[in-house]
Image: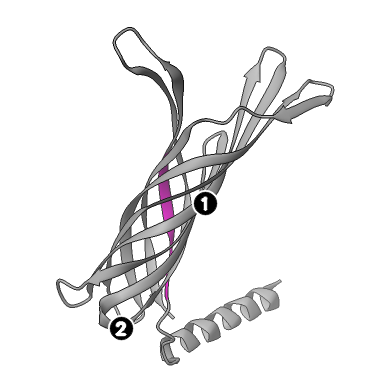
Amino acid sequence: MNKKLFFVCLVFALVFTGMLTAKSTGINLEVGAAYNNHQLHDIGKYYAYDGFKHHGIKSKSLGGFNIGISYPLPKNWAVFANTTFTFNHTFVNDTMLGAGYIFKPGKGFELLLGGAFAFGGSVFNYPEGSLTVTDSYFNVGGGINFTASFMITRKFGMYAGASVIYYRPVYGNWVKKDTNGNSYSRKGKLPNLAKSIGAKLGVKIKL
């Protein structure tokens, strides 16, 4: 057991040393915690007596983790990819692929602001009498991402950011399951709009 632990520590030390001494690839890796307020919007077909359509909103706050990469381009532009997994008796994934501009207000500071194509999915579980109901959706849309970072050393730093994504749900599934494991499924009724408001905080590594 001690030999295995020593070997694992040795491998980690070698990888860590290699990261510190290797020539930079220019890729930035971000790993950290994430918060998400996920919303489902149902907009009525007909106008009410006051001239407004009924707009129902279901929302839930979730926590999880975030993984992102970015690559700087000439003239302070950059491309980035970011994915977030959050949970709270519900599963939501938000993935962004986009481009943005890097502002550099001071040494070690970077502010990345960009727009992105986004896709993701959500799974909701809730009881209905003696049954368990599962709603799942696949969403496609776009959003805005903002990330601020500060490099503590040449390789390592911290980041914090926020994002807003608007989705159009394109596929849904609805499943009911009883206590005996019997289930019934059908194509689910889709919300008109899904929205994710996210925040993130973690460690930034220059690879």
- Dividing the picture into quadrants, the one containing residue 11 is bottom right
Viewer-side residue, 89 vs 18? 89
Q: Quadrant of the N terminus?
A: bottom right
Query: Is residue 15 on the magenta stretch?
Result: no
Image coordinates for residue 129, horizontal then vertical, percent? 68, 12
Give the structural element (helix, strand or loop) at label 1.
strand
Q: Nearer the viewer, residue 116 or 154?
A: 116
The residue stretch that appears in magenta: 28-37
- The residue drawn where x is 27% and y is 69% is 101
User: Residues at badges 1 and 2 in contact (C-beta under 8 Å)?
Assistant: no
- At 42% from the left edge and 50% from the top edge, which residue is drawn? 34
Q: Amino acid at mark 2?
A: Pro
Q: Name the quarter where the C terminus is drawn.
A: bottom left
The quadrant in which residue 205 appears is: bottom left
Say whether residue 64 is left or right of residue 101: right
Tell me if residue 35 is in the magenta stretch.
Answer: yes
Up-down: is 86 above or below 129? below
- In the rendered image, residue 139, in percent from the top left (x then y), is placed at 54, 44
Kindly report the distance in space between the C-alpha atoms of the residues bearing marks 1 and 2.
27 Å
Residue under label 1, please give it: 119
Q: Is residue 166 left or right of residue 85?
A: left
- Residue to which mark 2 is pinned: 74
Q: Quadrant of residue 5?
A: bottom right
Above or below residue 201? Residue 111 is below
Seen at 55% across and 79% down, the residue is 12
Mark closer to the chain start, 1 or 2? 2
